[in-house]
Amino acid sequence: MTEYEKRPLTNAEKQQRYRERQKGSGKKELRGYLTPEALACYQEIQQKTDWNDSTLLSNAVRLMYAAHKLGQIGLLNGWLTEHKK
């Protein structure tokens, strides 16, 4: 290969570049596992909104924060427990 020819990037290199760009734009990656109840809620919300995982997670955290600021976390957790969600 000459110095002017570039080799194609591997998938791992592409993923690394993507993660670096996301971090550079101020985004943080979160990971976790969903309970069966949470997964059912996720699937219903995703179907109704057509949000991707990132949008859904960002909005979920923002809504939870708003509920916390308004003192509604206990009320919402009670509703989830009553409705087995």
Image (cartoon, helix red, strand yellow):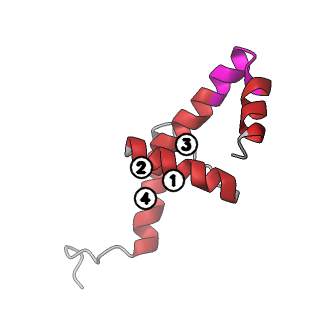
Label 3 sits on a secondary structure element that is helix
Q: Are marks 1 and 2 in contact (CB under 8 Å)?
A: yes
What is the spatial separation of the Cα atoms under label 3 and label 1, in whole angstroms? 12 Å
Q: Are marks 4 and 2 in contact (CB under 8 Å)?
A: no
Q: Quadrant of residue 3?
A: bottom left
**Is label 4 in a helix, a strand or a loop?**
helix
* Amino acid type assigned to the residue bearing label 1 in the image: Gln
Q: Which residue is identified by label 1?
A: 43
**Which amino acid type is marked by label 2?**
Gln
In the image, residue 17 above or below residue 81: below
Residue flagged by tag 3: what amino acid is it? Leu
Q: Residue at x 29, y 76 (%)?
A: 8
Marked residue nearer the N-terminal end (4 or 2):
4
- On residue 17, the disc is 4
In the shown orientation, is residue 47 left or right of residue 41?
left
Residue picked out by circle 3: 57
Mark 3–mark 2 CB contact (< 8 Å): no
Asked which quadrant contains residue 25, the reply is: top left
Please tell me which of labels 4 and 1 falls first in the chain.
4
Hey, what amino acid is under mark 4? Arg
Q: Closest to the observer: 36 or 61?
A: 36
Quarter of the image where the N terminus is located? bottom left
Give the answer, above or below, for where 21 lies relative to 65: below
| Residue position marked by numbered label 2 in the rendering | 47
Based on the picture, tell me whether residue 14 belongs to the magenta stretch.
Answer: no
Is residue 60 among what the camera can see?
yes
User: Residues under labels 4 and 2: Cα distance?
Assistant: 30 Å
Cα distance between the residues tagged 4 and 3: 22 Å
Rendering coords of residue 27 (x, y %): 52, 40
Examine the residues drawn in magenta and state their main secondary structure.
Answer: helix
The spot of residue 38 in percent (x, y) is 65, 51
**Disc 4/disc 1 C-alpha distance (Å):** 29 Å
